[in-house]
């Protein structure tokens, strides 16, 4: 079930992928999952929790738009992270050209990608 709710809390730092080396490992070794709005790379991490990061380059818009998009993607992940059966490191990359930035549009796209990640990693 894809959740869309109010912003009551934020994604804890321990659930964020913050080190450059960890993010690089996801890009190097992770599996790619595509939706119409975002690309998601994921790799199983062997920890007790999943970690999440957003990589938004200049093609995603100016700094205001990129930062808003990052906040929306982190919130969509926070609301839907319980559907992951196996802890993973996940990096979301928004596709260029996103003009509308609402949680109700971001959440379903991320939810579909997380569902694919779950299907892939739950078996392994």
Image (cartoon, helix red, strand yellow):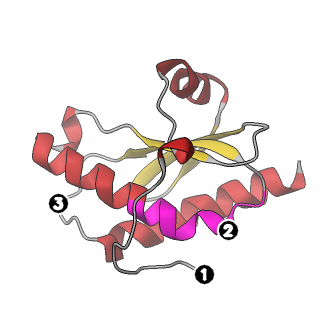
Residue drawn at (42%, 69%), measured in percent from left and top? 107
**Callout in the foreground (1, 3):** 1
- The mark nearer the N terminus, 2 or 3, is 2
Residue drawn at (22%, 47%), measured in percent from left and top? 67
Task: State how far apart marks 2 and 3 are (Cα).
Answer: 28 Å
In the picture shown, does residue 108 fall above or below 49? below
Q: Quadrant of residue 74?
A: bottom left
**Callout in the foreground (2, 3):** 2
Q: Which mark is residue 83?
A: 2
- The mark nearer the N terminus, 1 or 3, is 1
Please, what is the dominant secondary structure of the magenta stretch?
helix
| Residue behind mark 1 | 1
* Coordinates of residue 103 in the picture (x, y in percent): 32, 71
Residue 91 visible in this rendered orientation of the protein: no
**Label 3 neighbour load within 10 Å: few <14, some 14-19, many 20+:** few
Residues tagged 2 and 3 counted as in contact (Cβ below 8 A): no
Label 1 SS:
loop
| Residue behind mark 3 | 99
Task: State how far apart marks 1 and 3 are (Cα).
Answer: 25 Å
Q: Quadrant of residue 99?
A: bottom left
Q: Which residues are magenta?
A: 75-85
Confirm whether the magenta stretch covers residue 80: yes
Residue drawn at (55%, 47%), measured in percent from left and top? 15
* Coordinates of residue 81 in the picture (x, y in percent): 59, 63
Q: Residue furthest top?
A: 21
**Label 1 neighbour load within 10 Å: few <14, some 14-19, many 20+:** few
Residue 82 appears left or right of 56: right
Residues tagged 1 and 2 counted as in contact (Cβ below 8 A): yes
Residues tagged 1 and 3 counted as in contact (Cβ below 8 A): no
In the picture shown, does residue 37 fall above or below 54? below
Question: 51 or 9: nearer the eye?
Answer: 9
Label 2 SS:
helix
């Amino acid at each position: 079930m894809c959740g869309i709710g109010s912003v009551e809390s934020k994604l804890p730092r321990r659930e964020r992928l913050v080190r450059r080396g960890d993010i690089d490992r996801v890009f190097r070794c992770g599996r790619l999952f595509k939706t119409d709005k975002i690309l998601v790379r994921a790799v199983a991490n062997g920890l007790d929790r999943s970690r999440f990061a957003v990589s938004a380059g200049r093609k995603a818009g100016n700094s205001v738009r990129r930062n808003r998009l990052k906040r929306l993607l982190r919130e969509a992940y926070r609301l839907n992270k319980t559907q992951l059966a196996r802890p993973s490191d996940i990096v979301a990359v928004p596709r260029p050209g996103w003009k509308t930035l609402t949680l109700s549009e971001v959440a379903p796209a991320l939810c579909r990608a997380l569902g694919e990640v779950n299907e892939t990693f739950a078996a392994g």
